[in-house]
Image: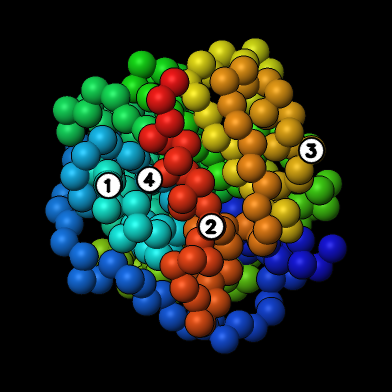
């Protein structure tokens, strides 16, 4: 159970049991520092929303996990995915370089913010790839803005409270900034214009999970976009939950990959110091799914 609880921190940032040391604990170095990209801010529903654009081709939107940035979630796989696609990586309300607003964060509002950003960028339709909390946001985009979604990749995403072990919710009530993984704190401080916002981001993300409500079955069933559901076999998300989502979404595929929460894409907390691109086994699977002709 201890290992499972440790992976909870990747979604919610801050579990009291997440104090295990790692060889690469104090680094957020990535492979994308020398990769050419464009970046900017867009006025979105009262936010200055930060985004980065890599590569050329069909648009693929990347939505990071809770408490994370573009780099802490996707820094290892962006160079791989950008070889054949135009990547639009975003940072959500109060995260990284994006500003905050005087309201709580929610998956529904995040979905509306991403949709507004795509319209501002003149993106009519795109594939969406969300990890962890970003995967829940991706589901909400497919539900609330189906016209924008071509294909959907939901990685380690939560749709119902029973999708994680029951102990998760008790730990959430005890969330504290000091227990937030150091890699995520460092990742935020590295890019945020005002690092004093870290506490606010932490508290808003924690509260979002405490008040989380199930996405109703009928809304999940309304998703018509071809969907790839991914989890690790040692993920915080239970296999039963992933299977349930797969059964609710008619046009969906399911993959359970060896490893923990985000290990299959090199999320910063699971990253091994001697990692290789071949470790990120989800990438060719995602590319094959996105390239498949319907």
Instruction: Look at 68% across and 29% down and name the residue there.
Output: 245
The mark lying in front, picked from 1 and 3, is 1
Residue 177 vs 166, above or below: the answer is below
Front residue of this view, candidates 37 and 109: 37
Tell me the CA gap for discs 4 and 1. Answer: 15 Å
Answer yes or no: do the residues labelled 4 and 3 have beta carbons within 8 Å? no
Q: Where is residue 22 in the image (x, y as percent from the top left)?
A: 61, 82
Q: At numbered mark 2, what does the secondary structure look like: helix, strand or loop? A: loop
How far is mark 2 from mark 3, CA to CA? 22 Å
Dot 4 corresponds to which residue? 62
Question: In which image quadrant can residue 136 be found?
Answer: top right
240, above or below 224, in the image: below
- The residue indicated by pointer 1 is 84
On the image, the x and y values in percent for residue 140 come to: 50, 28
Asked which quadrant contains residue 186, the reply is bottom left
Q: Is tag 4's residue or tag 3's residue first in the polypeptide sequence?
A: 4
Q: Can residue 69 be seen in this view?
A: no
Foreground mark, 2 or 4, reads: 2
Which of the image's four quarters has the C terminus? top left
Marks 4/3: CA–CA distance: 25 Å
Q: What mark, if any, has residue 240 been given in the picture?
A: 3
Looking at marks 1 and 3 on the same chain, the residue that comes earlier in the sequence is marked by 1
Label 2, on which residue?
A: 281
Q: How crowded is mark 4: few (under 14 residues within 10 Å), some or many (20 or more)?
A: many
Q: Residues within 10 Å of mark 3 (few under 14, many from 20)?
A: few
Q: Is residue 153 left or right of residue 42?
A: right
Circle 4: element type: strand
Q: Where is residue 103 drawn, in percent x and y?
A: 43, 38
Mark 2 neighbour class, 10 Å CA radius: few under 14, some 14 to 19, many 20 or more? some
The residue positioned farthest toward the bottom in the image shown: 23
- How far is disc 2 from disc 4 in space, using C-alphas? 17 Å
């Amino acid at each position: 159970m201890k290992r499972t609880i440790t992976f909870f921190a990747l979604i919610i940032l801050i579990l009291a049991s997440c104090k295990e040391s790692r060889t690469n604990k104090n680094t957020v170095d990535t492979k994308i520092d020398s990769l050419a990209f464009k970046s900017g801010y867009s006025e979105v529903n009262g936010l200055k929303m930060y985004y980065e654009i890599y590569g050329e081709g069909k648009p693929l939107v990347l939505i990071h996990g809770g408490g994370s940035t573009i780099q802490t979630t996707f820094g290892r796989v962006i160079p791989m995915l950008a070889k054949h696609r135009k990547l639009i990586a975003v940072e959500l309300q109060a995260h990284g370089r994006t500003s905050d607003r005087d309201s709580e964060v929610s998956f529904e509002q995040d979905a509306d913010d991403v949709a507004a950003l795509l319209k501002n960028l003149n993106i009519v339709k795109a594939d969406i790839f969300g990890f962890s909390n970003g995967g829940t946001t991706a589901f909400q985009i497919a539900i609330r803005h189906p016209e924008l979604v071509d294909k959907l990749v939901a990685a380690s995403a939560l749709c119902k409270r029973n999708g994680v072990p029951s102990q998760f919710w008790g730990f959430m009530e005890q969330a504290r900034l000091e227990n937030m993984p150091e890699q995520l704190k460092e990742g935020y401080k590295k890019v945020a214009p005002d690092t004093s916002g870290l506490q606010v981001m932490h508290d808003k993300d924690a509260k979002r999970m405490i008040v989380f409500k199930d996405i109703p079955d009928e809304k999940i069933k309304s998703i018509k976009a071809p969907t790839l559901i991914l989890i690790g076999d040692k993920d915080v998300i239970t296999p039963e939950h992933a299977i349930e989502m797969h059964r609710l979404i008619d046009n969906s595929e399911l993959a359970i990959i060896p490893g923990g929460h985000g290990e299959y894409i090199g999320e910063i907390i699971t990253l091994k110091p001697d990692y290789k691109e071949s470790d990120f086994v989800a990438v060719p699977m995602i590319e094959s799914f996105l390239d498949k002709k319907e």
